[in-house]
Image (cartoon, rainbow, N blue to C red):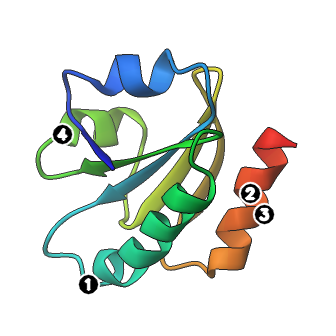
Amino acid sequence: MVELTQDNFMKEVMESDKPVLVDFWAPWCMPCKIIAPVVESLAEEFKGKVKVLKLNVDEAPDIATELSVLNIPTLVLFKDGKESARMIGVNPKEAIEAKIKSLID
């Protein structure tokens, strides 16, 4: 899974020709650790259809601020360079899957 930075965010997310799921997280965040295996599972499930990327908010705070990510974990779905959905906190895999499927169906 690609780790986003200030340097590659624009190319990997905003200019992507596929929908993108960005997991905003931090190493000290326990709920982030809880949802990480779910995000990794979704990355495998939707491989080739959706890019699943991670952004450490401690290492790229400007991006988190620019996108108004105030709590973590936050999952943001982008399509055609625009935010299309946002989920805050630990959500069930089925709920996240449904949001992803709504972008690719």
Three-letter amino acid code of the residue under disc 3: Ala
Question: Which residue is drawn at the image coordinates 53% and 48% (left, top)?
Answer: 76
In terms of depth relative to the viewer, which is nearer, 48 or 70? 48
Question: Which residue is drawn at the image coordinates 50% and 69% (left, top)?
Answer: 41
Q: Residues within 10 Å of mark 3 (few under 14, many from 20)?
A: few
Q: CA distance from mark 3 to mark 1?
A: 24 Å
Provide the residue designation for mark 4. 60
Give above or below for 92 relative to 17: below
Q: CA distance from mark 1 to mark 4?
A: 19 Å
Provide the residue designation for mark 1. 30
Q: Which mark is residue 87?
A: none
Work out whether mark 2 precedes mark 1 in sequence or the reverse, and give the earlier one. 1
Q: Name the side, left or right, on which 14 lies relative to 28.
A: right
Provide the residue designation for mark 2. 99
Q: CA distance from mark 2 to mark 1?
A: 23 Å
Question: Secondary structure under badge 1?
Answer: helix
In terms of depth relative to the viewer, which is nearer, 72 or 1? 1
Three-letter amino acid code of the residue under disc 4: Ala
Question: Secondary structure under badge 4?
Answer: loop
- Foreground tag (3 vs 1): 3
Q: Which mark is residue 98?
A: 3
Given contact means CB atoms under 8 Å apart, are the residues at marks 2 and 1 in contact?
no
In terms of depth relative to the viewer, which is nearer, 63 or 33? 33
Given contact means CB atoms under 8 Å apart, are the residues at marks 3 and 1 in contact?
no
Given contact means CB atoms under 8 Å apart, are the residues at marks 3 and 4 in contact?
no
- Foreground tag (4 vs 2): 2
x%, y% of residue 93? 63, 77
Which quarter of the figure is the C terminus placed in? top right
